[in-house]
Amino acid sequence: IMINYKLILKILGLLLLGEALLMVVPLLVTIFSTDYHTHSDILGFSFGILITLIAACLWSYYGRPLVEGMKRKEAYLLVTLTWIIFSIFGSLPFIMSGMIDTYTDAYFETMSGFTTTGATIMDNVEAQTHGILFWRSLTQWVGGLGIIVLCYWQV
């Protein structure tokens, strides 16, 4: 049985659209914050949203319409790819704002949030700006919801 990659691409595009919309919330926190690094955070979140939106639109456009049912094999692949791809795009605000120096560390921080492992590369978490802290917390919250949905789906 073949895996319907176009269906997975379509769903990943729609999920990325959701991730881009989630990034708007910490952008608003950053805009209304009085932090010192607010300008770099605004640019980091803005570019992160823009890049994520472009990928979401392209993937949704080139994906197959959602008329076919998803099989278990495709669902497992989708969950795995969602964690990987959400972390790729979710790390953009960390790296583009300059709050984390290397992409590897930004990716680790984001993957840690989305998978709810709780590990961090930050030496002083409290020293981060409000927008970055909010994004970090939001990734953990979304990851926790994802785990709950995954467990519910298995029942």
Image: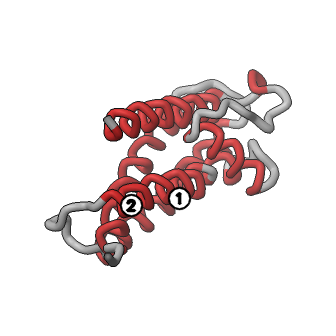
Closer to the N terminus: mark 2 or mark 1? 2
In this picture the colour scheme is secondary structure
The reply to whether the C-beta atoms of the residues labelled 2 and 1 are less than 8 Å apart is yes
Q: Residues within 10 Å of mark 1 (few under 14, many from 20)?
A: some
- Please name the residue shown 33% across and 33% down the image: 152
Q: Nearer the viewer, residue 45 or 124?
A: 124
In the rendered image, the residue lying farthest to the right is: 123
Give the residue type at disc 1: Ile
The answer to whether 57 is drawn above or below residue 133 in the figure is below
| Residue 30 visible in image | no
The image shows residue 5 at horizontal and vertical percentages of 36, 74
- The residue under the point 65% across, 36% down is 38
- In terms of secondary structure, where does tag 1 sit? helix
Q: Residue 72 placed where, x, y %? A: 33, 57
Q: Looking at the picture, which amino acid does disc 2 mark?
A: Leu
Which quadrant of the structure image shows residue 139?
top right
- Marker disc for residue 85: 1
Please give left or right for residue 127 compared with residue 133 in the image.
right
Residue on which the image places disc 2? 12
Q: Is residue 114 left or right of residue 64?
A: right
Instruction: Tally the numbered discs.
Output: 2
Left or right: residue 133 compared with residue 56: right
Q: Nearer the viewer, residue 85 or 36?
A: 85
Circle number at residue 63: none
Instruction: Name the quarter where the N terminus is drawn.
Output: bottom left
**Eyeballing the image, is 132 above or below 72?**
above
The residues tagged by marks 2 and 1 sit, at their Cα atoms, a distance apart of 8 Å
Image position, residue 110 (x, y; %)? 63, 44
Query: Quadrant of residue 37 in the image?
Result: top right
